Image: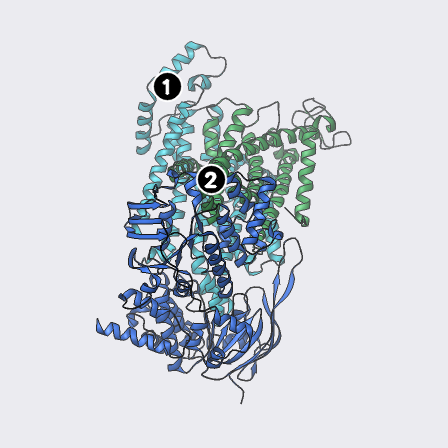
Chain colours: A green, B cyan, C blue
Amino acid sequence: MNALRLPLSAWIGLCGIAVFAFCALFAPLISPHAPDAVMGGVWQAPDRTYLLGLDNLGRDLMSRMIYGARTTLAVALTATVAAFVMGVVLSFLAAACGGIVDMVLSRINDVMMSLPTLIFALVVLAILPQNVFVLISVMAVLGATRVFRLGRAVAMDIAVMEYTEAARLRGEGVWWIVRREFLPNTLSPLLAEFGLRFSFAVLFLSTLSFLGLGIQPPAADWGGMVKENKDGIIFGVSAALIPGGAIAVLTICVNLVTDWILRRTSSLKGGRGDA
Amino acid sequence: MYPLILRRILLSVALLFAVSVLIFLGLNALPGDFAATYLGQSATPQAIANMRAELGLDQPATLRYAEWLWGAVRGDFGNSWASGGSITAQIGARLGNTLFLAAVAAVVAVPLAIALGMISVLYRNRWPDRLISVVSLTAISLPEFFVGYLLVLVFSVRLGVSTFPSTVYEGMDFWQRLSAVLLPAATLVFGIFAHMMRMTRAAILQVMTSPYMETAELKGVPALAAIWRHAAPNALAPIINVVALNLAYLVVGVVVVEVVFVYPGMGQYMVDAVTLRDMPVVQACGLVFSAIFIFLNMLADILSIMVNPKMRHPR
Amino acid sequence: MPELLEIRDLRISATTYPPGGRPLQVTIVEGISFDLARGKVLGLIGESGAGKSTIGLSSMAYGRGDIRITGGSVRLEGKELLSASPREIRRIRGARVCYVAQSAAAAFNPAHRLMRQVIEASVRHRLMTEAEARARAVELFRTLGLPDPETFGDRYPHQVSGGQLQRAMTAMALCPRPELIVFDEPTTALDVTTQLDVLAAIKHAIRETGVAALYISHDLAVVAQVADDILVLRHGKMVEMGPVGQVIRDPHAAYTRDLLDAQETGKPETAANAETVLKAEGVRAGYGSGPDVVCDISFALPRGQTLAIVGESGSGKSSLARVLTGLLPARAGKITFAGTALPPRLGQRNRDTLRRMQLIYQIADTALNPRQTVGEIIGRPLAFYGGLRGKAGRARVVELLEQIEMGEQFIDRYPAELSGGQKQRVAIARALAAEPEVILCDEPTSALDPLVAKGVLELLLKLQREKALSYVFITHDIAIVRAIADSVAVMRNGKMVRYGPRSTVLAPPFDDYTDLLLKSVPQMQPGWLETAIAGRKLAAAGN
C-alpha cells in the first residue's frame, strides 16, 4: 500500500488499538495489583490506589481490566485468525475449482449461515465442555461462514476475469491461481473483513461471557466482568459499565480503521470512494 | 415469478429440516454425554445409567430424532428436564412476549433507519451525513448489555422513570406492557438501527447514481420529483431486503436484551436452559429461533422478487 | 438572427483524484467554437477521450459527475445557458433540447413502462396533454419502425430488444418537438445489421421533423450518412470542421486523413500451399444440457495464414473459440492440431499442447492481472513453459517487448499505467512468449479506437510474416476481415453459412445472410444509407 495518508479517524482508531494491545502484551508488567487479590470492600469507590475502584468481590478493577484485555484480545484474535484461515482457504478453493466443489461447499455454508450465530453457539455450548479451546473453535467455525461468503464473492469477481482464464488456459494449477491471481487482488477487502470479524469476535465473546457461557471464572474477560458486576446497577454502582465501555471503545477503534480500509478499497478500484 | 417464489419457500423448508437435523443429531454426535453433563461432575455411573434410561437416551438417535421431529411438527416439544413441565406451554407464553418486544423495537427502528438513510444521502458528505455516520459507527460498536445497563442506570436508577427489571405478566393491558418494554426496546433499537441505516444509505446511493437518474435530470425533472418517481420504486426492493434481513438479526439481539432486563421471553428461557443443560428446552428454543430467522430471510428474498419489475413482468 | 446553437471558446474541466494526493482540476476540452443552424445535423467525430460526449452534454448545460464547464459561452437561440438559473435550464431540458444516450438499456428506468417514460418530459413541461402525448408517441413509434406501435409503450424496458430500446429513446427525445437533439453514439452498442435499421430510422425521423441534431460517434462512415457538417475532435480540441462531403473527399488536417485511412486496408492474397495446422471436422458443442450453440463446424487452417470467423452477437463465434481452447468440450466432431487429434477438454491436454495454442482477448483491461507488472505477465509463460527465469528470462522479456514495439522501460510498469493499445500489445507479447503455432484472437481490436486498432492489426500481420504464425481471428467487422484474412467463415446461429478463401467469400453471388452483413457496413459515400434501406425493402418485398 502506498501513500499512507490517514484521516484523523483512522489515526484515533490505530492509537486506541495500540493502547489495548500494549495492555494485553505487557499486563503483568503494568498491572498495579494482582487481578485475583481481594483488596478491600465490595464496590469500593475509586481513589488514588484503586483508580477504577473495586469490584463485586473487592478486587481491583483496574488490574482486572488490564488482564481482561489480555484474555479478550487473545481469544478474539485467535478465533478470528482461525476463522479467517478456514474461510479464505475454503472460499478461494470453491471459486477456483468451481463446479461440484463450489456447489457442495456453498450449500454447506448456506445451511450453517441459516442458524443465527448466538443461537447456534448457545445450542452447541450447552453440550460441549466449557473450556477455551471449545470456545475458540465454536467462534472460529461461525466466523468462517461469514468469511467464506465474502471470500467467495470477492474471489468469484476475480475468477471470471479473463486473466484468470488465461492462467487456466496456460495449464496453471489451482494453487498457483489462488496464490498469484486471487490473493493480490483481494487483499484490501479481505483486510477490511478481518477488522470486521475481529470486532464482531470481541462483541460475541463478551456476550457469551456475559451470559455465563464464555470464559469461566476465575479467569476474566471483559464480558465476564460485566456479568460479575451487573447486580450493582440497581444500586447505582456503575462498575459494570467500565468493562462494557472498554469493549465499546475497542470496537469503535477497530471499526474506524476498517472503515478507512473500505474507503481506500473503493478508491483503489478507480472509484471516488466517498460512498 | 410464482415458480421462483415456490422454489424459495421449498428451499426454506429444506433448510429448516437441515437445521433440525443439525440441532438434534449433530448435537448427539458431539462429545459429551447428556446425562453425565446434566448430572454434573459428582454423578455416580449408576445415577448416570438411571438418568439415561429415564430420559430415554438409550434408544437409537435416529429414532429419537424422528419422534422429536414428529412432535415438533405437531407443536409438542416434550417436557423440560429441569421442571418436568410442558415445554410447549412455556414457549407459548414466552414467545408472545419476545415477539411483542421485537415488534415494538422494529416499529421504531425501521422508519428511523430509512429516514436517516435518506437524509444522509441527500446531504451526502456534508455535516448531517458525517454526524449520522459517526453516531451509527458508535451504535454498532456498543454491545447490547452495555447500552442496556447504561439506560437502566440513567433512567431507572438515577431518574426513576422506568421500572427494572422489566416484568410483564398476564392481565397487563397494552399500555402497561408498552411502558414495561420501553427500555429493552430502546436498547434493541440502538443495536439494529445503525446497520439498517448504513445498508439503506448504500442501497439508495446505488440507485441515485444509476444512469436513469441522469436521464430524468436531462429531461428537466426537478430533483425531488426524480427521487420520488424514479429512485424510490427502484430502491424499494433493496430496502425491503435490508429491513427483513435486519429483523432476522433482531432475533439474536433479543436474547441478550431479555437477560439484561430479566424479561420473561424466549431468550431468557433459552439461556437459563443452557446454563442448566436442560437439553430438550435448548433444542426446542433453538429450533423456534432458527425457524423465525429462516422465515424472515425467506420473506426478504420473496419480497425482493415481488418488487422487482423484471420478475413481475418477464419477457 | 442568432443561430440555434452558438458555442464560443468552450472550456470544460474535470476533477481527478490521484491516489494519495489532493484532487486535481484537469482541462479536458478547450477552445471549442461552432454554430448549429436550425434543422441541420452536425457530426462530432473523435476517438474515445476526445470530449465529444462532454461537448454534446454541454449544449444542455450539463456536466456528468465531476465535469464542469469552466469557460466560454453556450447560447441557445441567443440565450446564454451558462448563466441561466437552474429553473430556466430545467425548462429547456426535455423540452427544447433532448438527449439520446449511448446505452438506452441503462438509460430507461426498469420500474416504469416505456410509454410513461417516453411522454414524461412532454407532459411535465406542459407542452401537450397526456392524451396528445400518447398519440404523438404512438406516431413516433410507427415512424421509427417499432413493432405494434399501439401497444409497444405498454412494455417494460427489459421486455424489448436493444435496438428497439434505442428507437424508443429516440421517440422519447422527439416527443416534445424539441429544437435540438443530442445523439450520443446511439448505434455503437448495436449489431451491424440492427445498426442499419436504427440509423435509417433516426435519419428519417430527423428529416421528417426538421429537428437540428448533434450526432456524436467515433465511426466516420456512420456520421457521413447522417450529418450535414462534421467537426473532428482530438484530445478536447477542434481539428477540422466543414461540410461532410468536403471533409471526406478533401480533408485538411493530417489527423483527419489518418482517420479516413484507417477505414480501409487490404491484405494481399497469399499462396495457400502450406500444411494444415488446425483442422475442425463436424464440431458440435453446447452449454450444459442446452441446445447446440456451435453446429457442424468444419474448417482447415493452413500454417502461416489467417482464418477470419465473422458473425454478429449470438452467432456462436466466441463459443467456437472456447471449444478450440478446450474450455467448452465439443459434443461431437474432431479437432486436429498439427496432425494430432486434440482432446476435447482442457484438463486432458498436456502442457506442450497448451503452449502451442494461445488466446488473445477482446478487452485487455480484464485480460491482464492489475497486480502484476508487465515483466511478470510476460515472464510467467517463459518460466512456466520454458523454465526461463532470472537474467535469461528478463533478457527474453526485453526481446519480446521490442517485438511488440514497446521498450524496456515498460518492464516494471503496471497495466493501469498503460493505454488500451499498449495493454493489448502486452497481451500479444504474453501469447508470443509461449512460442505458439496458433493464436486465437477473440475480437482483439473491437474495443480500441480505429487508429490504435490499425496499429495492433499491423503488428499482428508483421508477426505473422516473421514467425509463420497462424491466426483464427474472430470479428464482427468486415473491414478487419478485408485487412487480415486469407480465408473467411461466416457464422450465423451457430452454423457456418459460408466458408472459403477471402476473395471467394467476399465476392458475389452471396447467400442471403452474408449479403445482409456486407450491405450493413456503413460506407462513406453519400446516399449509401438510402440505397441500403431501399435494397432491404426490395428484398423483403420480394420474399
Q: In this picture, is C523 found above or below C207?
A: above
Whether residue A159 is visible to the viewer of this picture, yes or no, is no
Chain bearing tag 2 is A
* Residue underneath mark 1: B55
Tell me whether circle 2 and circle 1 mark residues in contact (CB < 8 Å).
no
Q: Is residue B91 left or right of residue C332?
A: right
Amino acid carrying label 1: it is Leu
Measured Cα–Cα span from mark 2 to mark 1: 57 Å
Assign the C terminus of chain C to one quadrant of the image.
bottom left
- Residue at 49%, 25% in the rendered image: B275
Residue B197, horizontal then vertical, whole percent? 52, 51
Q: Which of C95 and A34 is in front in this view?
A: C95
Chain bearing tag 1 is B
Residue C442, horizontal then vertical, whole percent? 42, 54
Q: In this view, does C136 lie to the left or right of C214?
A: left
Q: Nearer the viewer, residue C424 or C87?
A: C424
Q: Which of C444 and A260 is in front in this view?
A: C444
Query: Would you call the spot at circle 1 few (<14 residues within 10 Å), some (14-19), or many (20 or more)?
Result: few
* Residue underneath mark 2: A172
Label 2, secondary structure: give it: loop
Whether residue C205 is visible to the viewer of this picture, yes or no, is yes
Residue C24 figure quarter: bottom right
Amino acid carrying label 2: it is Glu
Residue C288 figure quarter: top left
Q: Nearer the viewer, residue C241 or B112?
A: C241
Residue C294, horizontal then vertical, whole percent? 30, 52
Residue C351, horizontal then vertical, whole percent? 43, 39
